[in-house]
Amino acid sequence: MKTSLVHLATAVLALSVSFAVETATPANNDAGTNTGGAATKRKGDLLHEPTYDECMASGNPVVTRKEIYHEGWIDLNKNGKKDVYEDPAAPVEARLDDLISQMNVDEKTAQMATLYGYNRVAKDYLPTKKWFTEIWKDGIANIDEHLNGYPYGDQDLPGVEFLWPASKHTWALNEVQRFFIEDTRLGVPAEFTDEGLRGVEHFKATCFPTQLALGQSWNRKLLGDIAGVAAREALALGYGNMYSPIMDVMRDPRWGRCEESYGEDPYLVAELGEQVVKAIQNEGVVSTVKHFCIYANNKGAREGYARTDPRISLREAEMLHIWPFEHVIREANPLGVMASYNDYDGIPIQGSHYYLTELLRERLGFKGYVVSDSDAVEYINKKHKVAKDYKEGVRQAVMAGLNVRTTFTPPHVFVNPLRELVNEGSIPMEVIDSRVRDVLRVKMWEGLFDKPYKPLDKVDGIILNDEHLAISRQASRESLVLLKNENNLLPLDASKVKTIAVSGPNADNQNYALGRYGPGQAEIITVLKALETRFAGKAEILHSQGADFFDSRWPETEIMWEPPMPDEQKMIDAAVEDAKKADIAIVVVGDQPRGKPQIRSTVGENSSRTGISLTGYQDDLIRAVHAVGKPTIVVHISGRPNALNWADRLCPVILQAFFPGMDGGTAIVDTIFGDYTPGGKLTCTFPKTSGQIELNFPSKPSANAEQDKDDKVSVTGVLWPFGHGLSYTTFEYSDLKISPTEQSADGEVTVSFKITNTGGREGDEVPLLFIHDEVSSVTTWEKRLAGFDRIHLEKGESKEVSMTIEPESLMLWNREM
């Protein structure tokens, strides 16, 4: 007994967890049948016993089937010997050969489906006796979003007990894993997956700005630090695969998912995506990049859930949308890819052998496994209508290259028709073996076959620790962009301000930091809260909402403006009265992200729009407050570029914050009052009207040209271009050098220069390197981004900066494609 416990401690990383010891019935080891493993006897309906508190109080790890745990290996198939697939020292491909040879059809097909976790599809937060009759008795590819609290973290549900503390959550996932290790025939572990775009999507975790906000920082190291935090917290909580980053290149600000893109430029998306993938996988967590591919070229607000009919040529699709995936797969080797549910040129990506196999694996070199975006398989039949029924859609998806179907229906919905297709011979067994092999290979990379349980002793010190919160605060600051600062009104002198009027729907709206795909509950500091904290006992803060995100007749008023209703006008009037009493007025406008289902959103997944003006009566609020005559600062907290025409015409200051994270309010107030010098630059264009769209970077020659003053028949020009961003200090560039001046097609060119901070305070500068093709075989963009950096300089300080133009930055698809 003592030796067995020592061996177990080695196998499970010395977990401080105590499991009940009961008599176990030997598993059925017949490869041709599956009884769901051992019918282990445990007390009550739940399979776990004892409780979390009892486990944490125990110093001895005890399990139900202690006989399977040995020093350095686990007898997963319970046959009393070390099989090749159970041997950590054996080559991975040999382990895979051995395991697949022992698997029956039911076990293989079970490795091709996701079980969405508690309160999504799974009804149980911990294994129950019913699991011996569920389809996952044969195993499962992964369990997604299990016990992460979305969207039920604040509801009175029994599973909420296992959200917090973090160690209790990890213990619960270990208990679920123990079912797959101990109670399935071959002991193939489950993978736990979760979203992670602005921190891991758990009830409580470090909450970062959205991807679009992070893009404005142009800071590769910061992006890597953030991804590392998210991955460490995910792993501590028990998740081994994060759906992050999004590699979609934003092209149209009406698109609901602009908030989840780094910006409009493929080079920028590729460079930042590379850092994020490397940082996640350096922590031992799988990075699943999405959405492959040509997903972000939406069609106004008309595309619906399926994102059908993206309007873009093949040449630009390759250079804008596919190239970032190509770069990141080559440089960072992400082990997961999510297949998108759009079509391209009439072919659903999810059902395309060309895109999922010939392009993704054979040309780009992807080596991991492919999951479907939600309902991508279903849409082959339901939306795209290229399959007569769902079963045919399953066949097309698997033959195209799908490894794992992931959506919000039970696994049997996919697995049962898949098994029928295999039995009928419509999908050859060698295809199934190949798809399953990819999944199992990734699980072996994660170490799940050798160390399936996560340690508990340090979990509670990892989530939301001081180091992680400091990185979050840095991200909130560096993601801000100062769009306008007329007559250098900012920074304000706090000692001269006695009364501040703050209004707008985002002034005290915590939801801006709690949208989908990140932490569900965090301590959010709004602009109002930050002002009240900073000026407590020093100045009076007057707050009125001023306007809502939606008016009572929305969305009709997006195309036919009508005066506010009496209650809406009353809100505006209250803000005006506050502004009359104040020294300064701050109007915080923008978007409401898609978060909890009951919250109506102006931006987010499936929240595309037909226009880009501020929603509701936010522009009316800006006009009314400005008319008071007090200095008016507009803070725009949004998930997309909005047409801030009234703010630009009337107000001296506009500060842009693309959903700036849990500490966003503090970052904004610190910037307004000079504790921080803004240094972000736009990674997306701000058009004046939706009638100009597409108006973006990079663009073809004269595509964004302004008309002559005497010959205008329409609105031209932009509010702010790609790369725009102001500072409180000034910078001077000098000593430009290019080496060599001539180079071969496969060589690199180095561009170096000096930057000097010539202003009166420290600050960050973001130098951008652009290239222009003077003569080409096909029409090319006016300029292409080929280098960037973020440089911090003290007052009077100079730094040498060097950038390398890689050959891939000069490549294009010629006339012959």
Image: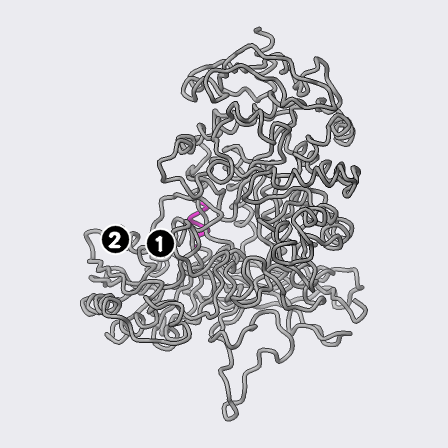
From mark 2 to mark 1, how far is it between C-alphas? 11 Å
Q: Which residues are magenta?
A: 471-477
Q: Nearer the viewer, residue 48 or 312?
A: 48
Residue in the foreground of this view, choosing between 587 and 252: 252
Quadrant housing the N terminus: top right
Determine which residue is flagged by label 2. Answer: 532
Residue type at tag 1 = Gly
Q: Secondary structure at mark 2?
A: helix
Q: Is residue 603 visible?
A: yes
Instruction: Residue at 54% x, 68% y: name it.
Output: 300
Q: Residue at 74%, 61% (x, y): give it.
A: 807
Percent across and percent down for residue 509 are 33, 54
| Residue that sits furthest to the bottom in the current view | 710
Residue 362 counted in the magenta span? no
Q: Residue at x 52, y 15 (%)?
A: 61
Is residue 394 rendered to the left or right of residue 704? right
Residue that mark 1 sits on? 665
Residue 564: horizontal and vertical position, in percent? 28, 72
Q: Earlier in the sequence, mark 2 or mark 1?
A: 2
When asked about the image quadrant of residue 569, the answer is bottom left
